[in-house]
Image (tube, rainbow, N blue to C red):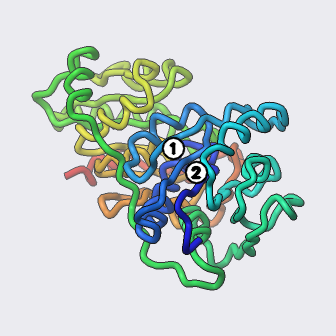
Amino acid sequence: MSDANSILIVGPSWVGDMVMAQSLFMLLRKRHPGAALDVLAPAWSLPIVARMPEIRRGYASGTGHGRMNLLRRWRIAAELRGNNYDSAVVLPRSFKAAVIPWLANIPKRTGFRGEFRYGLINDVREFQAAVLDQTVKRFAALALEPAEPLPRLPNPALQVCAARQQQLLGELDLEVGRKAVAFLPGAEYGPAKCWPAEKFARLASLLDDKGYAVWVMGSAKERALGETIAAGSAAINLCGKTQLADVVDLLALCEHAISNDSGLMHVAAAAGVHVQAIYGSSSPRFTPPLTDNKTIHYLDLECSPCFKRKCPLQHLNCLQGIDPERVAKRLT
């Protein structure tokens, strides 16, 4: 990729992974300062991609999660063909992810070996899980030459829109006289990643007493969860009331973000807020918030990390054992 003038990156399908991929984008920008970097990714992620100054343009993949949809992929490839990309970096290890760069006639197509992609990927890298022990390292390795050691990776940093911040404060009638703490109680992966709602609710009451404003953020799917957490305190449920880019701007106004290991945890880290990250079935060693401004709450029990969507032992001790009082004491 040493002589690349334009690079297409096929991005991941999860919020957190897309944020972590910015470390790769930063690395590519440093190595190829004059190259145009474009991203092909799900439409929902494009507002996040637009907050990454390294990227020239984002293209919506529009093929649907898990669907082959070959005709749609051919049409996207035809649109991209006119950009005359020198190379492509394919982050997902699936067969489907490698089809569009191949159809777009991109000469060099870099990706990990996997899912019978011979020919579709012609710069094949061996996937070494023991060396690439974090998601961000797996992404960044594809910007390097084979066997080249990983450098120190930059942390993601999303751009914040000050004008939109002020609009949101007015539109959502948010108080600006108190320090704000964001609650991010959702996790798309499953309940084994979710600190129980009653724990968040208790923490909201404790933070009331400390003089903090609490903003509960998430998608419309978390609206009922947000109501449960906000009941009995002055917490404000914003779930379903904001777009993803709005969450970036609101998080940047907060002093802390209390979050499960989720996509929004990585958004919070990249927005610059102090992340109080709560881990259950997953591991802070594999998907840590990529920031120095963080506090990890993890019990490291004998049964964790199991990486299951639901607790296989049906007790969820890895999360039940994290007390709201303990989290509240870590806020300074």
**Mark seen at residue 263:** 1
Where does the image place residue 58, in percent across and percent down from the top left?
53, 40
Question: Residue 74: which numbered mark, if any?
Answer: none
Front of the two marks 1 and 2: 1
Taking 118 as reference, is 203 above or below it?
above
Q: Amino acid at mark 1?
A: Gly
Q: Is residue 293 left or right of residue 199?
A: left
* Residue 320 can be seen, yes or no: no
Task: Tell me: residue 145, above or below residue 162.
Answer: below
Q: Which residue is mark 2?
A: 317
Left or right? Give the position of 70 relative to 133: right
Task: Name the kind of residue labelled 2 in the image.
Answer: Asn
- Identity of the residue drawn at 52% across and 25% down: 222
Residue 116 lies, in percent from the top left, at 89, 60
Q: Who is closer to the viewer here, 36 or 222?
A: 36
Q: Residues within 10 Å of mark 2 (few under 14, many from 20)?
A: some
- First in sequence, mark 1 or 2: give its number: 1
Which residue is nearer to you in this view: 112 or 28? 28
- Crowd rating for badge 1 (residues with CA inside 10 Å; few <14, some 14–19, many 20+): many
**Element under label 1?**
helix
Labels in figure, total: 2
Q: Residue furthest left?
A: 177
Asked whether 312 or 138 is in front, the reply is: 138
Dot 2: element:
helix
Between 256 and 56, the one lying in front of the other is 56
Q: Is residue 31 visible?
A: yes
| Marks 1/2: CA–CA distance | 23 Å
**Rendering coords of residue 134 (x, y %):** 57, 67
